[in-house]
Amino acid sequence: MVFTDEDNVSHIYAVATAKNGPGELMGSECTPRGEHYIRAKIGDGYVENTVLVGRRPTGEIYMPALREQFPQRDWILTRILWLCGLEPGKNRSGRVDTMRRYIYIHGCPDEDKMGVPSSHGCIKMKNTDVIDLFNRVNVGTKVMIRE
């Protein structure tokens, strides 16, 4: 959900979180909980379905045939909102640091189901939704992740 300054809901998006459930530990492939902020926005102007690896475009545009060719890839598409924790000892610093875990809100293949835990820790969104969200938020925007 996206809230206005007056705490009214302005937008609701479907997402998918970690197949391993919630959790903060490095290497857990869980989605970290708590208060975060958007540390960086990556992908402004990229065409929908741009494939990103290491936060950089690979030159590929995702298609189901590409998934068949590389079935084990973790598909990060279109836009990235890189998250940083705000709660020392919970999601910031040491073995629980969200940013050093490379936790993002990012686009995913359209055939991925939302509402089904399936990521490696990140928050996945449909490409059209992540583009819309990307255009609505700024670096520094707070993000609360709850179970």
Image (cartoon, helix red, strand yellow):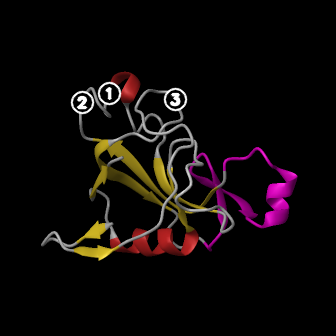
Q: Position of residue 131 (x, y in %)?
A: 49, 72
The numbered disc on residue 88 is: 2
Is 78 one of the magenta-colored residues?
Answer: no
Residue 51 to residue 99: above or below = below
Cβ atoms at labels 1 and 2 below 8 Å apart: yes
Label 1 crowd (10 A; few <14 / some 14-19 / many >=20): some
Cβ atoms at labels 2 and 3 below 8 Å apart: no
The residue tagged 1 is: 93
Q: Position of residue 44 (x, y in %)?
A: 49, 69
The mark nearer the N terminus, 2 or 3, is: 3
Mark 2 or mark 3: which is in front? Answer: 3
In the drawing, does residue 98 fall left or right of residue 115? left
**Residue at position x 49%, y 37% from top?**
30
Q: Residue 135's image quarter?
A: bottom left
Q: Nearer the viewer, residue 123 or 95?
A: 123
- Amino acid type for the residue under numbered disc 3: Ser
Q: CA distance from mark 1 to mark 3?
A: 15 Å
As helix, strand or loop, the secondary structure at mark 2 comes to loop
